[in-house]
Image (cartoon, rainbow, N blue to C red):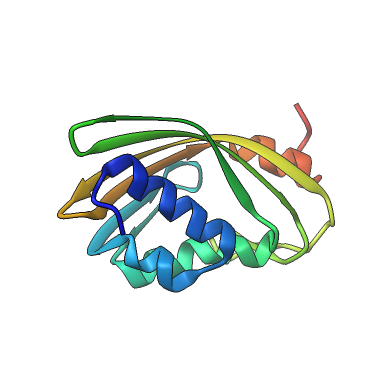
Amino acid sequence: MSSDPISLARDMIDAFNAGDRERFRASLAPDTVEREHATQTTVNGADAAVAHDFAWREAFPDARGEVASAIAEGDRVALQITWTGTHDGELRGPDGSSIPATGRRVTVPACMVLEVRDGAIASSDHYFDLLTLLGQIGAAPAG
């Protein structure tokens, strides 16, 4: 595992893309805090972050993040990401609601800002356009 903040951030995305929960968890500090702004969800701790993030893979089993750019200043990293995947599983909302699989493809732009501490991701802020995602699967009007 690299201690370089950009390499660490890219490795976390690569681990998610590969469906490798153990490698993904190894990139996180035990007390990591993850804020997913589009869904107004905050999760505390590495185990909770893995469970939360891999729930997206249950809804989009072929989910993949393509990092278009990465910049760092000190221990902070900003990633510009395009998420793609096929809605082949149930998408669960933070309020307990769910959207059955539609089989539709999504392409969603995102930004993730990470803070690295002692060679692990201590916090993340994930910004993406939830309305675009919902529109692409037919759960909201397409814009």
| Residue situated in front as seen by the camera: 108 or 1 | 1
Q: Residue at x 50, y 54 (%)?
A: 14
In the image, residue 81 sits, relative to residue 91, either above or below, namely above
In the image, residue 80 sits, relative to residue 9, either above or below, namely above
Q: Quadrant of the C terminus?
A: top right
In the image, residue 13 sits, relative to residue 58, either above or below, namely above
| Residue situated in front as seen by the camera: 120 or 124 | 120
| Residue situated in front as seen by the camera: 5 or 136 | 5
Quarter residue 7 falls in = top left
Q: Determine whether, in the image, residue 135 is placed left or right of residue 57.
A: right
Q: Position of residue 34 (x, y in %)?
A: 34, 53
Residue at the outermost right position? 103
Q: Quadrant of the N terminus?
A: bottom left
Q: Position of residue 33 (x, y in %)?
A: 28, 55
In this orientation, does residue 114 appear? Answer: no
Residue at the outermost left position? 118
Q: Residue at x 70, y 59 (%)?
A: 62
Q: Residue at x 71, y 51 (%)?
A: 85
